[in-house]
Structures are given as C-alpha cells and as structure tokens.
Amino acid sequence: MPRPHPVSEIVAFQGAPSSLSSEYGPAVPLGAGSGDGPFLVPTGAGIEVRDTALGATDVLGSFRTPGRIDRVAVAGQIAYLFGGDAGIVTIDLSAAPVAIGSYSGAGRVTKGAACPVGLVVSAGDSTLHFLASDGAGGLTPLRSVSFTDGRRISSIVARSDSFLVASTRPGVIPRLTITLYRLPSAGAAPDSLGEFALNGHEAHDVAWAGPIAFVADGNLGVLVLNVATGSFVRSVPVQASQFTFSVDANDTAVVAVAQGRALARFRRAGAAGDSLASLGVDLLDLEPLHVRLRGDLAVASTYDQATPPEPDEVGRSALEFRRLSGAAAPAPVGGTGKTRRVAWSGGLAYVADYTGGLRVYRAAGSDTSLVGVAPVGVNDRVYDVAVDPARSLAYLAAGAGGLQVVDVSDPSLPAVVGSLALSGLASAVALVAPDLVAVARRGGSPGVTFVDVTTAVAPFARGSVNVPFVQDPRALAARDTVLFVADEQIGLVSLRFGNPDAPGSLGAGSGFAARDLDLTGTTLLVATRSRGLQVVDVATPTSPILRHELPAPPILGVARSGTSAALFLGAEGALAVDVATPSSPFVRGPIGVPGTPRDGVWIGDTLLVATGLALERYSASPATAVPALSLANDAEGALAIVRATWGIISLPGLAGLDLYRDLGPATAGTPDATGRKVNRSLLPPGATEAVDDSITAGQVHRYRLVAFFSDGGSRKVAEGSIFVPSGGRLGRPFPNPYRPAEGAATLPFVIPSGAAGRTLTLRVHDVSGRLIRTVRQTASAAGGFGKIGWDGRDGAGRRAADGLYFLHLEGAGLDDARPITLLR
C-alpha cells in the first residue's frame, strides 16, 4: 500500500487578469432602464457592469467566478448569478460588485428571473424552484414544480411580483405553454395565476410588457400573445423568416435578433401595443444570440459566425449597439483575448491568441498589462508559441497560416517577419536546436516538419515525419536529438532528428491520447485525456520509462516549476500536483480558475493561466498544514448524519463558508477537485458547524471547509476525514413524541454490508405486546443508511390510540426495536 503523503495544499490568490475577453450573455439594464445608463452583462466567467451613457467602452465594475455564468437576474441592488451545477451566487451591486451569499439547493441552475421578494429558477429542463429573498443575499426555498408532460422550460421573465414562464414541448408539432405565477411577500407559497398553450409554436426567448408577451418563435419570427386574455394575436416575421433567437420589448418598442446578423426594430401600436410597425433591420458585425433594450438602445450579444476548427475553442464575442431611432450608437466592445498557450522570457509573457495572433504581456511583479500585439491573417488561428530569447524571435503555429516568425526585439511593436506555408494546420511549435524549430501539423496531412530558421525572414523546411507515425500532434518537447510529441490519437510519440533532413520514428505511440508536455531535466510530464498525468523518465531519450500515472480528469495542459506542477482541466478547473518524487506524485489541491484553463506558466510564485477568455494571474504558495475539522457521526450511530465543527474563521474579505465532501481520506490524491457542497446556502462568516445528512455508509469521507471571499476567490481553511461504519443498527424514531397530523414517523437504520436488496419488516406493537401494524420494505440496492415509516394507523387503516408503542425492525441483518410515543 502506498505510503500516505503529508497533507499539503496550494493556496492561490487571484490577481487582476492580464487580459479579458468574454462570451457575453443577455444584458440586464440596471435602474429604471428608460434611458441611457448602466447595464450588467454575464461574461461566461462572471459579470461586467457597463454604462451606455459613457459610451459602454469602459468596464465600471466586474466580478469573476471559477465556474461558468451564462445568465443573471437583478432585483434592485442585488444580482443573482446562475452558475449551473455551482448554483446561485448573490452579488451586491450598490458599490463595486461583491459576493454576499450563495445557494446550491436548486440543482443545476441555468436560467431564472428575480423580483424584490424572490426569484424563480429552472433546474434542468423541467423543474421550477421558487425562492424567497431576504434582501441581503439570503435565499429560502418556497416550492418546487416539476412538469411531467415533456415540456422544456425556455424562458422566465419577472415583473413586479409575478413571473411568466415559457416552455416548449418538442415534436413534429411543437407545443408552446405560457404559465403565470405570483410570488407573494412574507415568504408565502407562490400562486398559480393561469396557463394557456398553443400548438405549432415554440419559445427561445420571451419579453413581457403591459398585457402583451413577445416570443422569439424560431423560424416563425416574433409571436405576439395577449397574456391577460390568454390568446394568440399574430406572428411577425423577422428578416425573411430567418430563425429568431431573442426578443425584448418596452412600452413603445420591440427588438429581435435573427440568423443572418439581423437586428429588427419595431414600434408598438394599437390600444394594447400588440401591433408592430417595422422601423428597419440592421446588419450586425457578428451573429447575434441575445438582445436587450436599455432605453433607446438595443444591446446585442454577438459571436463569430464561423465555427472554430477546434471543438474546445470559442469564437470571438462582442457587445454591439443600435439606436431604435437610427442615431449614432456606441462602438462595439469586446475583443479576442482567447489565450491558448503561454510562454515567458525576460519578464515578458508571450501568449498564443487563438484569433488574435501573438500578444505580449508584462509578467514580472504586479504589472501584467498588455505590451504589444502582432496580428496574423484573418483566417489564421494561433495554436502555440515558442520563444528564442537569444535572437529575440517568437515562433507561432498559426493553423492554416503555417509557421509565423515574429521579431520581438521591441516587445511593444512585435512584427511578423517571415512565414512558411505547410500542409495541414500548424498546431504546435518548439525550438529544438539553435536555428531549428519543429512544427506539428494536424488535419488532412498530419506530421511534424523540421524547419531551418537561420534566416528569420526566409524559413525553409528540411525533413518531416508523417502519418502513420504522427496522427494528431498537440504539443512538442525536445531532449538532445529526440523530439517528444503529445498526440491526441496515439499518445506519446518519440522522433529522432539527429539529421533534420531525414528524421524518423523511434517506435509506436504509448496508446493513450496525449495533449501537452512539460520537460524539466530528465522528467517529462504528459497530460493525457484518459490516463491522468503520466510521469516519464527520459534520462535515456530513446527509451522513455513510465514512472507513475496520477488519476485526474482529462488534462488540456501542464506546467511545472520546481517540485510543483499545475494541471489545466478546462471546465473542471485546475489542480496543483507535487512532483518532487517522480515515482509518487500527489495532488496538493484545486485552484479555482475562471473560464476554461488550458495552459499556463510559472514565474517564481506567480502562475499565469491561459483560460480561453483571459490570461489570469495567481500568487501561489504551498500551505503544509491546515486546521483540522472536528467530525462526528450521529450519536445513535444510525442516522445518515456527520456533524462538522470548527473554530471561528477570521480572514479579510470573508463573505462566508462552504463545506465540501469528497470520497477518500485527506491524504489521498483527490479524484474530485471540487467535491459535493454540503450546505445549500453560503454559511455566514461566524458559523462554526454544519451537518451533512446525505452520506454513504462503509466509506471514508473527506471534508473541506472553504472560505468564500467577496471578490469571488476562495481557499481551503480546514479539513478532516471520518469513516462511516456500515454495521446494521437502528437509530431513534423521529419525531418522538409523534403526532400523525405532522406526517409519518420514521425509523432510521443502517444495514450491514452485503444486505442490500433484502426485505425489511417493521412490526408495530403496543405496550401490551399486541401487533398493531406490519410494514414491509426492500432495502436500497445502494445499501447503507435508510428509513422506514409508520403513519400512526393499524392494519385496518384505523387511527391508533395515544400511548407508547414499539417499532420492531427485522431483516437484512437487523433485529431490534425502539420505543415511540403517539399523541393526537
């Protein structure tokens, strides 16, 4: 059995990002919304606050999150960020945006709407959760509604204390359903105000102004409905029946965006405002997905029309503005910043920007601002970068643009000085010898080409190794005259290039899809798709030896500094790993990174991470010890409960605490970087305990107490482990005394290992020993904890008299009884 490692954790403090671009979601006006002014927009990895009165070019405030944010809702000065599996984060907008709470009890939250007294959110496709707000960031569940007729929730809109929910049942003839709810004050349960449906229509977005709802109805354009009467009014086509994605409305106007870069403007007319007169159709620069109104200004969230060649890349996103009157509007905002790979030299970071070429940033000290940009062709996509500091040159693997050679002698004015066209897509590049680079090729003609760059303005190809020896190369690293290739199809590949004019293969690939490499001395770290992190000894480059495999989710990139390595896991975040002993690496802890981390570089204790949306900056250091959590099973040993307690946590900027549970002891390499959150709502900063009531018997559970800060950052502050035994035993009946009007009484139990699926028999006896009722139940196939109930009635269905009773449970290794007092 491997020797347990000492508990160790990486503590990473997030700094300001060096670059910032976004995948913009639908904007939300702040304040009255009747004229130019501020609005909030989700950015994929948080929110931005902009102001149309100031030209919308400056970010007035922002908030970053480790997880993805696609939708937000605002009520007064409170914003609710919907983070999918991460739940809801509550933000105070009264000054700089800061976190004041969170809630994870609604499942996977993707859309919702808010009013001053609460909000309605959708979990998955078919469930609504109604939550009451205390006005200070706290949320309390009121009611959940699940639709069982096949409908999928499309949009939720709030107005005053009411909510309109649009859902679609897909099929050959789709069915649109509009449902109205009211959320009373004082935490009362929501009222259903009515529902009506229309066949042949669907909802992709909904706006609600006055008695009229406007629905983005796909190929049918804008559907106009009278909510007050529950009736269809008309359909209005948009841009020659192009597919309509989104719609918004106010008291006088309607805007809609459709396929073909169309933004349609309408003036409302008629007594109810249900007639639409066209004001024209504008062509946007990029394809729109969302549109919202801020006074006279339409704010469209747009995206690249072309699908990125890489499945895990994102296209450029922007905010585009149009005046309903046709007057001048602010210039579009947004940018590239889609960082893919990063290298550094001489205090500068060189970033391969997928659509923007080479970007150079300061990388020393606290200043990581942009220094210069060298753009590439409009159709080129930059996959990788390598730097030759001796010659002040950077080499770009530029997709269809082949190899690009960039002069960086003046970092503020980098310039492409040479290029070499290659077959396929140039996907990786490495400096392998003085004046010699290797360029990987993907696509229709995969392989690796060795390029002579003695004359930077005129690079020329020497020899190549092609398919089948190389099939889908993603990263390169060289030692002596051996080139190691991370191949997505055939794994780690070794090539010889002692004679660059006649390179060759040294053998078959490892067979495990590889995506990145980091070579330090004689240790090669291989990021794989299915085998985690591979640690390979290349002391003899022609005969690499696998020393260890560390399980991890699919890895996009890896970077090492000294004894620490960072694994970049895309949507799964990032992990820090201790690689001091190559034969026994272990996980030191997760790093919460916004966006989709795919590569990074260490500069001392500073970690720069390419996230696809930004170049994030962290100050990282190890913490060799953290305080221990006090963990205890339920006193009776049968209830599915672990109680965690800790001392007061006092840290600057602390917004609250979250308790996470992982399987496995604290000393094990955690296979789950995030774990399952125990508390539904963010625990207050002064909290000192939490209860976990959904554990599994017969396993070791690891608990982590994580401090959540007002700027969106987090760090572990305590941890501990506890073994939950699986022997059969009974708990205490609850409630006791038992009043049947409050529901059934429950008797918790634990069944021993191997007894899952057997029959349990509960016999209820009165104080004289007479049998009153028999209840049978099958033990869960999952085993462990369970409970069985009694409704206070005898076998004939009659109410049992007040008094003392005994609950005797038998079967699945159990044979025991507990007393209970019944009171009417």
Image: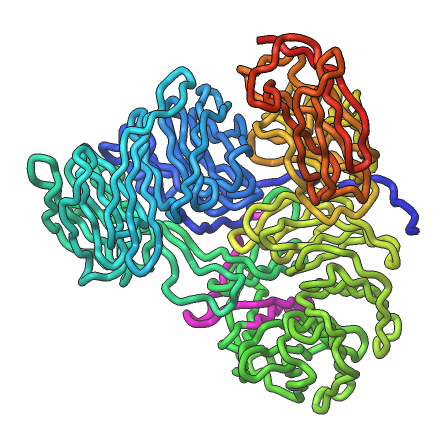
- Residue 163 screen position, x and y as percent: 32, 32
Q: How is the image coloured?
A: rainbow
- Mark yes or no: residue 715 visible: no
Q: Nearer the viewer, residue 402 or 406?
A: 402
Q: Is residue 786 above or below residue 85?
A: above
Residue 430 sits in quarter: bottom right
Residue 450 sits in quarter: bottom right
Magenta span covers which residues? 368-397
Q: Quadrant of the C terminus?
A: top right
Q: Is residue 316 above or below residue 224?
A: below
- Residue 681 screen position, x and y as percent: 57, 27
**Could you tell whether 562 is left or right of 398 in the image?**
right
- Residue 206 screen position, x and y as percent: 28, 43
Q: Nearer the viewer, residue 61 or 546?
A: 546
Q: Residue at x 56, y 18 (%)?
A: 798
Q: Residue at x 21, y 50 (%)?
A: 222
**Could you tell whether 396 is left or right of 487 in the image?**
left
